[in-house]
Image: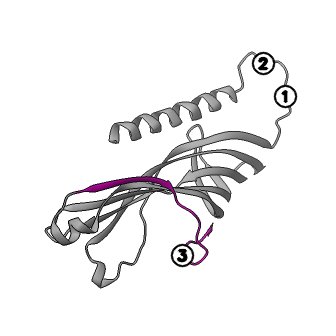
């Protein structure tokens, strides 16, 4: 997993370097081109979601764990001044997590992986300082909308819980939105 994070990070640095090199003026340019204050690019990366779920005391055998996901989107930037820009993006993001339920003997008997797909609209102000190496700082907020969910895993029949019968049942199904349980908006 760490190797995948390193590769994704290096790819992002390489893409950023290529985009920066294409904007560097050449020494033999004879004409000064008018620079547009607008720029557009793609956004992508890796994310880890850590759920914040309150488990009641009587359900201490249930644990929620972090899940990995991906982000892909398009970003637009408007350069207000040399050091200040406004950014807006439209990003598809996965916010995944896992749930494990332990048996009375400490064995892991139920596993569920939740996959949640969101569309997110982050808005930010970008401040940059320095030359030739630049330091960027962003401040802003976002609004997200839950598009879909999916869950997969395994569970055991009540016979296992009561009598130790080890009959397992696997499942792989969509997770339907429930107005009473789920919150479709995120910010």
The percent position of residue 183, horizontal first and vertical second, equals 59, 72
Residue marked by disc 3? 181
Mark pair 2, 1: CA separation: 9 Å
| Residue marked by disc 1 | 33
- Residue 185, by quadrant, is bottom right
Q: Residue furthest top?
A: 28
Residue occupied by mark 2:
29
Part of the protein shown in magenta? 167-187
Q: Who is closer to the viewer here, 168 or 23?
A: 168
Q: Earlier in the sequence, mark 3 or mark 1?
A: 1
Question: Dot 3 lies on which element?
Answer: loop
Sequence-first tag of 3 and 2: 2
Query: Is residue 85 visible to the viewer in this orientation of the structure?
Result: no
Q: In the image, residue 71 lies at what x, y percent?
A: 56, 47
Q: Residue furthest bottom?
A: 57
Question: What is the crowding at mark 3: few (fewer than 14 residues within 10 Å), some, or many (at least 20)?
Answer: few
Local crowd at mark 1 within 10 Å, few (<14), some, or many (≥20)? few
Query: Which residue shows up at 58% across the image and 37% down it?
Result: 132
Q: In the image as oriented, which residue stretches furthest toward the left?
A: 105
Q: Residue at horizontal 25%, vertical 73%?
A: 61
In the image, 43 versus 140, the foreground residue is 43
Can you tell which quarter of the image residue 44 is in?
Answer: top right
Question: Is label 3 or label 1 in front?
Answer: 3
Instruction: Tell me the residue at 53%/60% (across/down).
Output: 175
Q: Is residue 177 left or right of residue 97?
A: right
Q: What residue sits 60% from the left and 40% below the top?
A: 131
Whether pointer 2 and pointer 1 mark residues with C-beta atoms closer than 8 Å, the reply is: yes
Question: Element type at marker 1?
Answer: loop
Please name the colour scheme applied to the rendered image: one colour
In the image, residue 31 sits, relative to residue 59, either above or below, namely above
């Amino acid at each position: 997993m760490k190797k995948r994070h390193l590769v994704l990070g290096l790819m992002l640095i390489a893409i950023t370097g290529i985009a920066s090199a294409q904007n560097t003026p050449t020494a033999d340019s004879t004409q000064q081109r008018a620079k547009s204050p607008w720029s557009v690019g793609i956004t992508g990366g890796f994310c880890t979601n850590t759920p914040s779920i309150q488990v009641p005391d009587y359900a201490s055998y249930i644990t929620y764990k972090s899940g990995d996901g991906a982000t892909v989107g398009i970003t637009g930037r408007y350069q207000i001044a040399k050091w200040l820009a406004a950014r807006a993006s439209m990003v598809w993001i996965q916010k995944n997590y896992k749930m494990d339920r332990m048996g009375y003997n400490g064995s892991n008997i139920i596993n569920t992986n939740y996959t949640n797909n969101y569309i997110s609209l982050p808005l930010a102000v970008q401040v940059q300082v320095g030359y030739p190496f630049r330091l960027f700082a962003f401040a802003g907020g976002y609004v997200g909308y839950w598009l879909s969910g999916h869950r997969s895993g395994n569970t055991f029949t009540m016979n296992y819980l009561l009598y130790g019968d080890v009959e397992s049942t696997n499942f792989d199904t969509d997770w339907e939105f429930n107005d009473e349980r789920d919150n479709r908006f995120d910010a």
